[in-house]
Amino acid sequence: MTITATTLTRASGAAAVAAGLLFVGVQIGHPHLDATSITTTEVVVRSTLKAVMAVLALAGITGMYVSQVRRNGLVGLVGYALLSVGYLAIMSTALTAGYLLPAIADTNPGFVNDIIAVSTGNTPTGDVGLFSTVVRVQDIGYLAGGLVFGIALFRARVLTRWATLLLAAGGVVTIALSVMPDAFYRLLAFPNGIAMIALGYSLWRTTRTATSEATPVTAGAK
């Protein structure tokens, strides 16, 4: 199999679709997190899938940016950089929830509950060190990156435009949902997840169409 720019772009589109599906899927029926539930197999699996989602999403937005790098311009570069930082931070916090917190939940449940509180936008009762900074970086990258990158994609006029607007507007929706109870907090992933599914499919379809149009037709070929 020959690896070409077209192959990589289509793969990034598929990665974005998978990331969006995972982002939405892991939130459905998500249990309430505390020092007890964090040790369950279900939470470990969900956290692992969140980390995988972040990696796939990073591959997806890389394809979206690189495939139309001139159209995306400086705004696209800034948005891509911010959103990349957001997804890298999401991967880090997901791995922390899946593999670090369960190991200390029995010996230091107060600290675990404080980490969970910071992760879900609540106020901890104790000191969580630099973790609160990581979460702030994650939020800024995810919200601002989605807004700026969505605007750049909308201006590029290549991918599905309603999905670019949903990606851009997702930050506003996220801010509104973040002040609501935990059941609503889980809806934070939906705008971004749906946008990633649509944008990934659009990238895959656009690349496929462009490849078909660029393939010469040999005279007499059937």
Image (tube, rainbow, N blue to C red):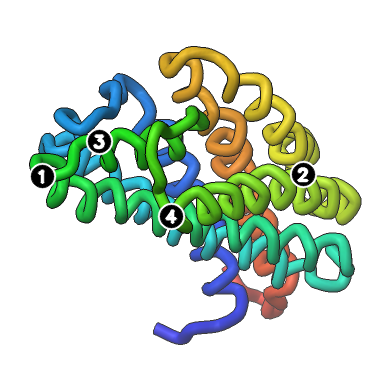
Lower position in the chain sequence, tag 4 or tag 2: 4
Label 1: which residue? 107
CA gap, disc 1 and disc 4: 18 Å
* Residue 182 as seen in the image, left or right of residue 101: right
Lower position in the chain sequence, tag 2 or tag 1: 1
Label 2 neighbour load within 10 Å: few <14, some 14-19, many 20+: many
Q: From where the camera sits, is residue 15 visible?
A: no
Q: Nearer the viewer, mark 4 or mark 2?
A: 4
- The percent position of residue 63, horizontal first and vertical second, equals 62, 66
Amino acid at dot 2: Leu
Label 2: which residue? 147
Label 4 neighbour load within 10 Å: few <14, some 14-19, many 20+: few
Amino acid at dot 4: Gly
- The percent position of residue 56, horizontal first and vertical second, equals 45, 58
Label 4: which residue? 129
Q: Quadrant of the N terminus?
A: bottom left
Residue 110: numbered disc: 3
Label 1 neighbour load within 10 Å: few <14, some 14-19, many 20+: few
| Rendered position, 43 above or below 57 | above
Q: Residue at x 87, y 72 (%)?
A: 70
- The percent position of residue 158, horizontal first and vertical second, equals 80, 53
CA gap, disc 4 and disc 3: 14 Å
Amino acid at dot 3: Gly
CA gap, disc 2 and disc 1: 41 Å
CA gap, disc 1 and disc 3: 9 Å
Q: Are marks 3 and 2 in contact (CB under 8 Å)?
A: no
